[in-house]
Amino acid sequence: MGEFTIELANPRGFCAGVDRAIEIVERALELYGAPIYVRHEVVHNRYVVRNLKEKGAVFVEELEEIPDDSTVIFSAHGVARVVQNAAAGRELRVLDATCPLVTKVHTEVSRYGREGRTVILVGHAGHPEVEGTMGQATGVLHLVESVEDIDNLNIPAGTPLAYVTQTTLSVDDTAKILKRLRERFPEIEGPRRDDICYATQNRQDAVRAIAERCDVVFVVGSATSSNSNRLRELAAQTGARAFLVDGAEDIDKKVLEGVHRVGLTAGASAPEILVDEVVKELQALGGSLITVSSPLDEGVSFSLPVELRH
């Protein structure tokens, strides 16, 4: 295996919503003690979830698994209204770690429904964020994943329409879907500001820039992470061979044979410690880092729930 250079994408890794969600779990454990129940993985990263489990967080899929008089945290992906109501009905102590940018989409969906509009949600079926957003609808909602889905929509002429999107989609793919949506339904209303979050956009721009120069790109992130999967897809579309890895142990030496430049980035729920470990592994395999750069401060932070502020 020859020598090669390593280029880090920037920004990469944790976004403000993930930072906030993890801090909510850690502070709740400090304040109320273990166990603290978390509905769904608080963020989609295996390392983060394992770490929080070790500190006393218990991850469940449904509220029925949580004993009475417990504290429950809703994950960063958000939940449906029925889940919020069920938790309130059982008088569980609720801490909401839903990313504020997801909450913005929930608010839009509710408002459009109250206005009597049919809502079209662009997103991936089965993703927890999409399920939560669909569960916030107050009227008719259609989920679309592709341009073809829009062509197959059966909506009566004259129906007032609006659209929203999942926050972690491919920026380029979503632009094509929204272009077709506006062509087919010229009167459709949309949010004042794009629903795809700043962190998703910035990480996609950064990986596209390095993928143009790299033979191989590794994206640190778990298979369940939507934004990490989009980074891998985008790197591959840009021309590099691209691989999603949970950490250094997933690096396949075979893919490094004959390469000159390797790119490295991390999804919004992947901690920098995993990036550091991947860099060390690549260096041990003959790589040299072009530039050492800490993750860029994107100037965004979200406040904690009032009951957790010291």
Image (tube, rainbow, N blue to C red):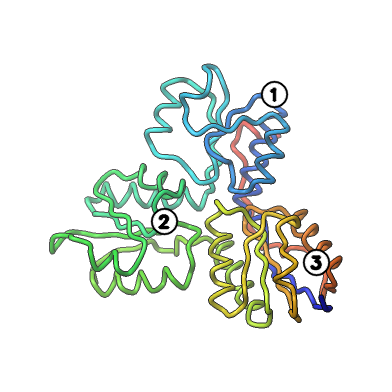
In the rendered structure, the answer to whether residue 138 lies left or right of residue 4 reads left
Q: Amino acid at mark 3?
A: Leu
Query: x%, y% of residue 302?
Result: 61, 49
User: In this figure, which residue is indicated by the disc labeled 1?
Assistant: 33
Give the foreground label among 1 and 3.
3
Label 2 secondary element: loop
Decide: few, some or many residues near mark 2? Use Cα within 10 Å; few <14, some 14-19, many ≥20: some
User: In this figure, which residue is indicated by the disc labeled 2?
Assistant: 124
**Where, quadrant-wise, is the N terminus in this rendering?**
bottom right
First reached walking from the N terminus: tag 1 or tag 3:
1
Query: x%, y% of residue 49?
Result: 65, 41
**Where, quadrant-wise, is the C terminus in this rendering?**
top right
First reached walking from the N terminus: tag 2 or tag 3:
2
Disc 2 and disc 3 in contact, CB within 8 angstroms = no
Picture layout, residue 2 above or below residue 135: below
Q: Amino acid at mark 2?
A: His
Report, in whole angstroms, how far the alpha carbon at label 2 lies from the one at label 3. 33 Å
Query: x%, y% of residue 277?
Result: 80, 57
Report, in whole angstroms, how far the alpha carbon at label 1 lies from the one at label 3. 40 Å
